[in-house]
Amino acid sequence: MKIVMIGTTANSILGFRIPLIKELIAKGNEVYAFAIDYSDLQRQLLKTLGAVPVDYILSRSSLNVLNDLKMMLQLKAKMLAIKPDIVLSYFIKPAIYGTVAARFANIPIRIAIIEGLGYVHTASQNGYGLKKLILQRLQGILFTISFKFATRIIFLNTDDQKDLSKMALFSKSKVKVIGGIGLELLDYPYSKPDINKTIRFIFVGRLLKEKGIYELIDAIKIVHQKYPTTELVVLGGLDEDNPTGLTKKNLDDLIEQEIIIYPGHVDNVYDWLSSSHVFILPSYREGVPRSTQEAMAVGLPIITTNVPGCRETVIDGKNGFLVPAFDAEKLAEKMKFFVEYLDQIVPMGIESLRIAEERFDVHKVNTRIIEIMRLK
């Protein structure tokens, strides 16, 4: 069969879809991977796997409906040329417009994967605000249209399904919940934390307000008042164009005051995870966070927020703790727990590994996706 996968960036294809692409090709299928920014090297890497890279134009953040309609017509034209049997679209805009384009191109199987509801469904401490509420309604209308044409709708967590159902109309009979896109566990082998070393917490994510970076900074300051040698490693890029992000000056001050350890951009995330003791993600909302899955596979306890997506990764008190969003004091309280009860780090980390093996093994997840695609 011919299968079209529509994503956004080439990095997302190469970072998260390679195992699925390999399994589909191994089963004798032709795979066409759509992305907006392929480099020559990335195209060659996909061709080496046996897949066909396809460029298309998409403005990820634009609210210009005319541009989005042009993009949908472009996708329809490319599909008519390829004549695939299945179209698998993921991320919000591809899921909406790629699914509709696939219907207009008469593709028989049209699958939309919702990997999180994004910015407009991420509440602040004061709620959503008028702008986000309006955008939720508009997004709901678009999803209602798109999902009418989808043969299957895949969510990563039940909260996203529940929240989107308040804004969009869709048949529950089309819905499957898979609990995360998974990862190659062999790339993140278990590493027993050394509790005789200085306790190190680690955060991996963009340095944005909605990732909980400000609460995390406040929390480590609280922890340092009692345990000044405790370390916090922060891995993630600055986004100074985003008004909610840390600025370069913020970051430099934190480094100079030795509040955080910031190694900059790294390619060896595993090495940093395996030299840490506890993973923290105080995000306001996620799909099912990949960074947390990686930390679980390595064998780290998790502290994260009791919000959609994040709560899918923790059994409270078993492999870590769930804390309220926006609450630096509660976050600091759980961080101090691991400093004071060192003997809980290894067993909770082993429980994280068990959950990762059960829920987030990419081969198990891909088996489910392939079944949903009616290839098995």
Image: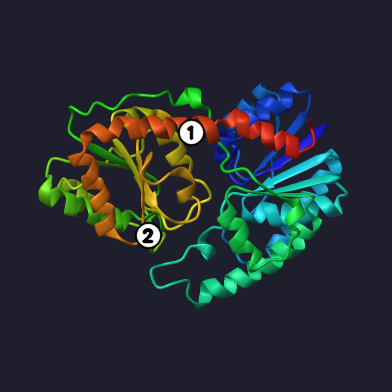
- The quarter of the image holding the C terminus is top right
Which type of secondary structure does the marked residue at label 2 adopt? loop
Count of residue discs: 2
Q: Position of residue 337 (x, y in %)?
A: 23, 45
Residue depicted at 18% across the width and 50% down the height:
223
Q: Which residue is mark 2?
A: 325
Left or right: 40, with 30 as reference point: left
Q: Position of residue 316 (x, y in %)?
A: 39, 46
Q: Is residue 289 above or below residue 64?
A: above
Q: Quadrant of residue 30?
A: top right
Q: Residue furthest right?
A: 106
Which type of secondary structure does the marked residue at label 1 adopt? helix
Left or right: 109, with 135 as reference point: right
Q: Type of residue at label 1?
A: Ala
Residue depicted at 28% across the width and 29% down the height:
275
Residue depicted at 22% across the width and 29% down the height:
195
Q: Is residue 112 above or below residue 183?
A: below
Quick one: label 2 or label 1, which is nearer the N terminus?
2
Residue depicted at 56% across the width and 57% down the height:
159
Tell me the distance, in whole angstroms, between the alpha carbons under discs 2 and 1. Answer: 23 Å
